[in-house]
Image (cartoon, rainbow, N blue to C red):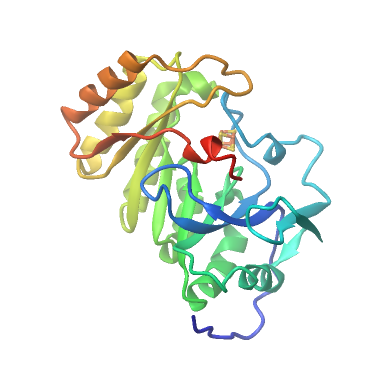
Amino acid sequence: MTFLFQASLPQVRARLVEVFSSIQGEGVLVGHRQIFVRTYGCNLRCTYCDSPETLKESGAPRFCRVEQVPGTGQFLPVPNPVDADTLTGLLQQYLSEPHHSVSVTGGEPLLQARFLAAWLPAVRAMGLRTFLETNGLLPEHLQRVIDWIDVVSMDFKAPSAIGMDLESVRERHRRFLEIARTTSVYVKMVVTPGTTDMEVDAAIDLIASVDAAIPLILQPVTPFGHERIPVPPARLIALQARANRQLKEVRVIPQTHKVMHLL
Ligand code: SF4
């Protein structure tokens, strides 16, 4: 791996929760090795959220935890907020092994779009691809960083899981997907026992109206937090069949990193 060392980045800083190297457990890149940068803060409060440390009302943690050896759970504390040069340096410790990409996840990473717009070019300069995991509801923020994103994993949020009305969710998601499609994008929808046919149809119709070839990943909820009950198998099969009538690529993929006890 060759590095292109750059001059210092502008002194933008981000509030982070953790940095680590692991195996992607969700979506179309499942199984790929990635470096994960988890940002603090989210504009939503989903019933199934499995990253509660990003939502603490008391504010960002004083320290971002940085795993020293992948998979060991041994962390070094780095004071928050973290500046762009420091974060670039933290990533380099993992690069003795090949990685598919850097996953910027959260929380909602686009809440820190200004930082990402300044920092992501340094990731590309290290020879790494960039992968954005987002709730798909901040199109104006996406516009600021889209030139630096190789793959967008965009959630379609079921209104029943986030307490918003379907019309406003649909319109924001539509604007987001129109921007995201200028790079590689797929849509992921977490399915809970409470997800309705109307909500799934809204996701299907949205994708079909933009480009039916955009993959849809139906992700059965991992029982956690407020969501204790799994989705029945027959329901998953029926929803996939429903989506397959309009879309070209529909897959059902659970959170595999939970099975392997990976971060
Ligand atoms: S968008 Fe993601 S991080 Fe934010 S509350 Fe929902 S599941 Fe949690």
Taking the spot 71% from the left edge, 39% from the top edge, the residue there is: 53
Q: In the displayed structure, does residue 92 sit left or right of residue 180?
A: right
Give ligand 1's quarter of the image. Answer: top right
Q: In the rendered view, would you say 210 is above or below 52? A: below
Q: In the rendered view, would you say 146 is above or below 162? A: below
Picture quadrant of residue 225: top right
In the image, 78 versus 84, the foreground residue is 78
Quarter of the picture containing the C terminus is top right
Q: In the rendered view, would you say 2 is above or below 39? A: below
Taking the spot 31% from the left edge, 37% from the top edge, the residue there is: 216
Q: Position of residue 95 (x, y in %)?
A: 57, 72
Picture quadrant of residue 67: bottom right
Q: Position of residue 135 (x, y in %)?
A: 49, 40
Q: In the displayed structure, does residue 78 sit left or right of residue 205?
A: right
Q: Position of residue 71 (x, y in %)?
A: 63, 52
Residue 79 appearing in the image: no
